[in-house]
Amino acid sequence: MNEPKIIQLPKISDPRGNLSFFENDNQLPFKIRRSYWIYDVPGGENRGGHAYKNTEEFIVALSGSFDVVLDNGTEKKTFALNRSYYGLYVPKLYWREMENFSTNSLAMIVSSTDYNAEDYIRDYNEFLSKVKNEQR
């Protein structure tokens, strides 16, 4: 199983404003199949609360900040995303929750798969069982 990690993206500084980007083969460990974004999250609300059987993701805070809590079934680790030139790689089979959204935050997520409701694990006990079976 791959490990989650922060990936620093290129940052091109310019007096007119900075530019950052990511490309499939240069920064990301997967081909992008889907993109989506999360915004206007009311104060105190969380997002996520699921894992994927097959999907890998890359999450960037394009604006504002939020935390991503990842759980591999044994331990939890929190990643604070607050710079648009850093992104978090999330492998498959990690329980993911997003919390502590700042006002006007914008989360951009790219995925390795198309949307498929069957790929989601929304029950935490089912997730734990799946992880245990994968480790055998």
Image: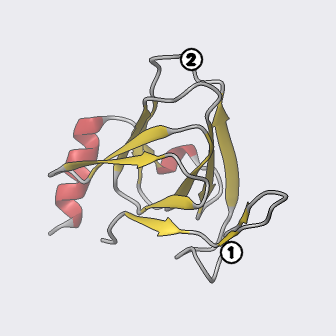
| Up-down relation of residue 117 to residue 89 (above or below) | above
User: For residue 13, which quarter of the picture?
Assistant: bottom right
Horizontally, residue 73 falls left or right of residue 112, namely left
**Which quadrant does the C terminus fall into?**
bottom left
Q: Position of residue 38 (x, y in %)?
A: 63, 36
- Amino acid identity at mark 1: Glu
Evaluate whether residue 96 shows in this view. yes
Q: Which mark is residue 124?
A: none
Q: Residue at x 32, y 35 (%)?
A: 123
Q: Position of residue 81 (x, y in %)?
A: 47, 48
Q: What kind of element bears circle 2?
A: loop
Seen as rendered, the residue at the extreme right is 16
Decide which of 22, 48 is in the foreground and name it: 22
Decide which of 74, 80 is in the foreground and name it: 80
Q: CA distance from mark 1 to mark 2?
A: 31 Å
Q: Position of residue 93 (x, y in %)?
A: 35, 56
Seen as rendered, the residue at the extreme bottom is 25
Decide which of 1, 101 is in the foreground and name it: 101
Q: Which residue is mark 1?
A: 23
Q: Which residue is mark 2?
A: 42
| Up-down relation of residue 83 to residue 12 (above or below) | above
Evaluate whether residue 55 shows in this view. no
Q: What kind of element bears circle 1?
A: loop
Seen as rendered, the residue at the extreme front is 15
Q: Residue at x 68, y 46 (%)?
A: 36
| Up-down relation of residue 36 to residue 15 (above or below) | above
- Amino acid identity at mark 2: Pro
The color scheme shown is secondary structure
Q: Residue at x 17, y 57 (%)?
A: 132
User: For residue 133, which quarter of the picture?
Assistant: bottom left
Q: Residue at x 74, y 60 (%)?
A: 18
Q: Classify 10 Å Cα crowding around label 2: few (below 14), some (14-19), many (20 and above).
A: few
